[in-house]
Structure formats: structure tokens, C-alpha cells
Image (spheres, helix red, strand yellow):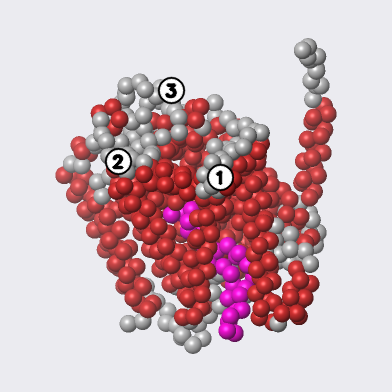
Amino acid sequence: MNTTYLPSDYLPIFIQLVLALGFIVGSMIVSHNIGPKRHSEKKDDPFECGIPVKGDARTPISIKYFLIAILFVLFDVEVIFLYPWAVNFKGLGMEGFIEMILFMGLLLAGFYYILRKGVLKWE
Amino acid sequence: MNLTELIIKSIIILVIFGVTLVIAMYSTWAERKVAGFMQDRLGPNRAGPFGLLQPLADAGKMFFKEDFIPSQANKWLFIIGPCLAILTALMSSAVIPFGDSIRYEGLTIPVQGVEINIGILYVFGVVSLGVYGIMVGGWASNNKFSLLGAIRAASQNISYEIAMGLAIIAILMMTGSLSLRSIVAGQESFLTWNVFTQPLGFIIFLTCAFAECNRTPFDLPECETELVGGYHTEYSSMKLGFYLFAEYINMFVSSAVISTLYFGGYHYPFMNTVHNALTGSLGEVTGHNLATLIGMLVLFAKIFFFIFFFMWVRWTLPRFRYDQLMNLGWKSLIPLSILNVVVTGFGLLYDIEYASWLIVIVMVVLAVMSSARAPKRVVQPQRS
Amino acid sequence: MKATEIIFYVLTAITLLSASFVVTARNPVHSVLALILTFFCLTGHYVLMNAQFLAAVNIIVYAGAIMVLFLFTIMFLNLQKEDEESKTTLTKMAAVVVGGVLLVVMVAVFRAASVAPYDPATYNTRVGLVESLGMVLYKDYLLPFELASVLFLVAMVGAVMLGKREPGDRHF
């Protein structure tokens, strides 16, 4: 098993990245060049189930999604804080467990507030 | 890392890459065969024996289709979208340990792209980038259906990512390492497989994996009854192919991650006996390599089972509604996984390894009680 | 030149290029994508320093979460209207002044900060790994960690207040 963990361990990821990029660019170029090309006014329009296009899709979206994204950032950071704690769980013992309960308790209080405010309510 | 090692690593990466592509290709075939089986049809059976050449025919068709870019779309972003989707899908397999190790000229090389300290976080990082492919593509199309599909997909993915991360925490607490190889090594004997010690975590992780892959019952982003084709409405040719292909690669990778995290990876019962017998009869090097090969086959059997499970669910369960999907993610899975972490913590502190069964038992009891209390449905006699 | 140095300089060049593209790009989505690329290069720098956990966190939180929020924000804005009128000479001047002050502060900080010398022979390469980081965070920096949860609470309340629905909002 690996015990040193050095930056050079990451070299194969570069090989994989190069392979993946090669595959993607290659097939993009091939499929772009061998397919037919035909244009017409109706065909170039965005698909709208057959009715004439009205306005365009650069329109504001519901704020719900935006709130979900903000909450996601907050909870993601929380989960990130949990990783080093979980890895050292046995070393930190009871003390660490109580620390984390405190941390999570405050976060869950916020979560409860969000639920009560109906942010996550979809209609 | 010396040159021989790097060359062998490159070969391993190349093989993993090829295997990923082939499995993703044949998943499309398998999906249609499974669908045919479940719906009492034959499925593809014209191209080659059992329709085995069908994926090749499909790929050829995809290549020869018109590579169409709508005039109102944002040209470069429209192209970058599917490329990002498949790039993230292809990159995620690097850290998965596919087998124990190969012995070659005195070197012992693990069958794994890279063995790094942060293993599982690499997978999470790459998965969290998968959102961009969908969002950029859907936004660039300049089509309302695409935009809606993209936003739905993005909010769904990010919502389930949190529960997924929390479900993992319980495993990390038991293993004490982020490296996937150490997590596999911690599940040496059959009863210490994480699926037995972390049943709740497994169910949460599985549900989130379905949501992350945008598979039924969570395929809201592309539900054809509401959104035409979802985020890939405007796509054609290989760009559409990339989106579909990325879904199947993600399915393969998540099956591999599930098998690694919860089903002991390349471990199987009586593994040490087999290993000793092989090294005893064939010599240290050949026997070890053969044992590794058996372990790899076992891992792939587990992976194929989960890919089949994905398909099975697809043809069994109906789709969720969007509010149900969000409620399940935020109001059920996140609190449940936090509870799971706390209970696992207590279990570890007081040396009870199977503590999280407690939650499962309580949940089952609650479910039985609520179904017993629910008013009985009146059975309507059917006249025929 | 050693291989590490070559990688470092190439990474730095890409970082600076993509970072300047973030500022110069006309299309906000392009600049978000360039910012993601910048974060990737920074991750590469973290890996070079063997701060593996920070590298992963940088991808997950910055490139994965915060940039998604940025993209949502861009989609949330109405990009059809070109807000050219807001870029008056006054705002441009203000931007230059603020940026200049920031630059001065940064330069001053870097001049004042001293980088502790290290001895390659005794240096512990595992110092940036998640195990040692966790021990430091949950033993020595416990109070800042617990205070972070208060910060999260405040941020949640703020998000809820910001996102209050007003009558007449269009949404789908």
C-alpha cells in the first residue's frame, strides 16, 4: 500500500486527462466533418413544439433554484469540515465527537429555521 | 515513481479507459435487452448475434448525423457543454481500485489508476463538476426547455451531492482514511463489508447515485412528457451521443464506487484460502497475479450487478414529481444521513459495530406501524 | 531545470492567462468557465505542495459549489439588457481606485510576511495530508471552527431574507 503520498502520484491523472481530451476532440472533429450540413430558417430556430418562437430563453429563473444553490454551498462546506474529523474520529475520541455535535447542532438549528420559513417548499 | 512503474501505470490507465468505453457502449445494448426482457419483447436482435453489434451501428449513425448548431445558440458554449459532460465522466474512474496488485519483475503495482490520499474526494470533486456540462449545454442552447432541464438537473445534482457526502462520512469514521484502497482493505472479511455495518448509509448512497446519474426515478431533467428532451433538446449527432454516453459512463463509475465502498471491492469470501492455494501451487508471482485476476473478475461481477440494478429500477419505478424529489433529498435524506453519522459515532465510541442497524430497525417498525394504522383500502370486486 | 519547476511555471502561466481572461471576457459564462480553469490550476499548485486535502477542497467547494452558484446567478440575471449605462466614468474611476488600493495592500502584506525556511532533509511531506490537518483543526483551532458554525447560521438566515418572494415575481 502507498505510504508516502507524493505529488508524483498524480502523474497518471494527467495521462488520463490527455487520453480523454484526445478522444473528445477527435470524435468532435470527425463527427463535425462527416455529417451533412443543411440550413433553413425554420430549422435554425430553437425547438418549441412547432409553434413560433416567442422571446428567447435568456430569461430570469425562479429564485428557488438560487436559494437551493446558496444552501448547497453552505452544506457543502459543512460536509468538507466533516471529512478531516471523520478521518481522525478514533484519534479525537469523545472530545471530538462532542465538538462535532455542537457544530452540527448549530447548523441543524439553521436548517430547521430554513424549513420553517418554507424555503424548501415547492408548489 | 520510476519509468517502468509509470509505463505500467499508463497501461493500466489505458486499459481502464478502454474498458470504461466498452462497458458504456454495451450498457446501451444491455439496457435495451433488459427493457425487452422486462416488457416481454426481444430487444435489439438484428445487428450481429443477439444484436451485439447494435452499439457499433448506433455509434456509426451518431457520427454520420448532421452536427447541428442552432443559429440563436451560443456556438462555443454549445460545443463545450457535452465535451465537459463526457470529460468529467471519463476522468472519474482514475482512483477506483480494480484489483489488488500485479507483481512484475520485483515490483508490486496496484491495479488502480492512481492511489492517492484523498481517493474518494477526487471522485466527489469530479462528480461535482459534472453539473457544468449540463448547465452550460442547456443554457447555450437558448431554448426554454433546455434551460429548464439544465436548471432542474443542476439543482437536483447539487441537492443530492450533500446527502451523498454525508453518507460517506460514516464509512470514513470507521475506516479512518479517504483512500479507496484503504477502505477496501478495511472490508477484508465478509461480515465487515460496509453494507452490513452501514445499511442506512448504503441506501442513502444508492439513492443519491441514482439522482446524480439522472436515472429513473430521478430523470426529471429529461422527462419527455414535460420538457421534450430536457437539456439536450437541441443537440444532435455526436454531441447528443456524448451526453447519453456520459450517463452510461457515470452509471458504470457509480456502480464501481458502490461496489468499492459498500461491497468490499475486489474482496470475496474465502479470498485468502484461494490466494494461498494459488500461490502454493503456481508459485509466488503467477499465483498472486492469478488471485488478483479473480478478484478483478469478482469486482466486475459486482459492478455488472449494479448496472443491471440501475436498469431494473428504470423499468420498474415511475418518475418522481419535482417537489417530491426535492423533499426526499432535503427533508429526508440529509437529516437521516446526519442521524446516521451521529449513531455511527456513538457505536464506534462504545464499540458497537452494527449500531446503525438501530435506525433501520426503528424505521422499519415505524413504517409497519403507520401502515397498520392506515385505513384499509376497500378492495373493489372486479367484474369481468 | 527540474521537472517540478517546469510544471510549476507552465501551471503559473496558465493560471495567469485564464485569470486575466476572467476579467476581459465579454460573456459572463465564458468568464465563469475561465474562473473554473483558474481554480483548476490553483489545485495543481496545491498538489505540487502536497496539500492534497486542500486540493480536493478547492475543487469541491470553489470549482464545484461556488462556481455553480455563480452560474445560477448569471442565469438569474436578465442578460438581454446591456447594462452599459452603469459603466460611467465615475464607476470606472472608482473601480480603478479600489483595485489600486487592494494591490497596494497585497504588496504590503507580501513584503511584510516572512516565509519560514525549511530543511528538505527533515521536512515531513505528510504535513498537508488530511490526517495531520484534522488533528490541527480539531485540537489547536477549535474555537475558530466552532465559530464557523455561527457564521453558517448567519449565512443561512441571510439567504432566507434575500430570497423572500415578492408579489409579481416571474418564475418557472
Dividing the picture into quadrants, the one containing residue C132 is bottom right
- The label nearer to you, 2 versus 3, is 2
Dividing the picture into quadrants, the one containing residue B121 is bottom right
The residue carrying mark 2 is A36
> What amino acid is at disc 1?
Gly
- The one nearer the camera, A56 or B47, is B47
Outermost residue toward the left in this view: C89
Question: Taking B85 as reference, is A89 left or right?
Answer: right
Q: How far from the left and from the top, in percent, is residue B246? A: 48, 49
Neighbor class of circle 1 (other Cα within 10 Å; few <14, some 14-19, many 20+) is some
Q: Are marks 3 and 1 on the same chain?
A: no
> What amino acid is at disc 3?
Pro
- Rendered residue at 58%/30% (across/down): B321
Image: B25 above or below B298: above
- The label nearer to you, 3 versus 1, is 1
Neighbor class of circle 3 (other Cα within 10 Å; few <14, some 14-19, many 20+) is few
Dividing the picture into quadrants, the one containing residue B297 is bottom right
- Rendered residue at 40%/68% (across/down): C45
* Mark 3: secondary structure: loop
- The one nearer the camera, C89 or B115, is B115
Which label sits on residue C167?
Answer: 3
Neighbor class of circle 2 (other Cα within 10 Å; few <14, some 14-19, many 20+) is few
The residue carrying mark 1 is B51
- The magenta region covers B87-114
